[in-house]
Image (cartoon, rainbow, N blue to C red):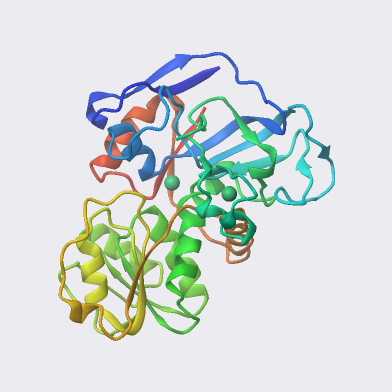
Amino acid sequence: MLATVLHHPAPATGGPLDLARVADPEPGPGELLVRVSACAVCRTDLQLCEGDLPARRLPIIPGHQVVGVVEALGPAVAGTTGAGVAGPGGAAPAVGTRVGLTWLAGTCGHCRFCVRGDENLCEAARFTGWDRDGGYAELVVARAGFAHRLPDGPADADLAPLLCGGVIGWRALKVCGVQPGQRLGLFGFGASASIVIQVAVHRGCEVYVCTRSERERVLAIELGATWAGDFAERPPELLDAAITTAPVGDAIVHALAALDRGGVVAVNAIHLDRVPEFPYDLLWWERQVRSVANVTRADAREFLAVAAEIPVVTRHEQRPLDEAGEALVDLAAGRVEGSVVLIP
Ligand SMILES: [Zn+2]
Ligand SMILES: [Zn+2]
């Protein structure tokens, strides 16, 4: 098959990805072989390719927002033709089913975190495109219980950007605890935040957006933001909750400074440069800072249902698989509107 492979992390402009013909992967016990139809590019892919996120395995095929069709079942996978749901207790998707793969590729299922429903914290968790080869390829193998059946209707390329940015954005909304009708701040306005705002506005929240990009501020207002400004500006009202997605620790301090008493800042970043020192007064009055780590399968199921109901719209440009490297360069340079979706 054709795949885009990371051998040695390097700056995106140095071309760390190689397009190569590699052996077709074979599904092992409990696994599915999926023919990839679309794979959206995530900022985490860029951080992995550039080495900001240390590689867990090299070479690796990146990509963890994968839409495809089940082409074969490995041994000991009970496929059905019914409408069961992938995941604990559910039937595995049958051959021919359209599925989505997310960042969470596998968990142990029996540690203290897994048994209490926090499988995103599993110490043995495995991740798509980090521990296991991902979707920058024509074929990918996934654990059957971690492949999500996708709703009928939306095109493959429309669904792919939902599978990380959308699902982790949904988790961030839960972590920050914002309730319908409350004020939510979004600090950074990339692919994930442009999905989160649609869910928050749908739930009757007032959304305040801080981003350096004038273009993103315009988009935020189009998507229903009450106010949009620069990081240096303070939103005109105190916020009940905030989500930071900007890849800089300063955003956390800006968010805290805009927060009402008892508010929560959810930090949605797998890698941050640092958290700057800040006066304790910003944290006083029971304000909280929480990180958002990975996702659970329940997050994915819940969000895919919500996204279909609203419906959430993603902006994306489609590019052939062999332009994955250029896509990373554009993402690093801030030239991507919404998401890039790679089509093998
Ligand atoms: Zn576990
Ligand atoms: Zn991601």
Residue 123 vertical position relative to residue 170 in the rendered view, above or below: above
Residue 130 % position (x, y): 45, 35
Count of marks, rendered view: 0
Depth check, front residue: 287 or 148: 287
Which residue extends farthest front? 112
Residue plotted at (72% across, 33% down): 30
Depth check, front residue: 104 or 22: 104
Left or right position of 210 against 38: left
Q: Quadrant of residue 13?
A: top left
Q: Quadrant of the N terminus?
A: top right
Left or right position of 19 against 91: left
Residue 60 % position (x, y): 44, 26
Q: Is residue 229 visible?
A: no
Residue 177 % position (x, y): 46, 75
Residue 203 vertical position relative to residue 94 in the rendered view, above or below: below
Q: Is residue 89 visible?
A: yes
Left or right position of 267 against 295: left
Residue plotted at (51% across, 14% down): 22
Residue 280 % position (x, y): 19, 77
Residue plotted at (28% across, 24% down): 15
Residue 56 vertical position relative to residue 168 in the rendered view, above or below: above
Residue plotted at (47% across, 72% down): 200
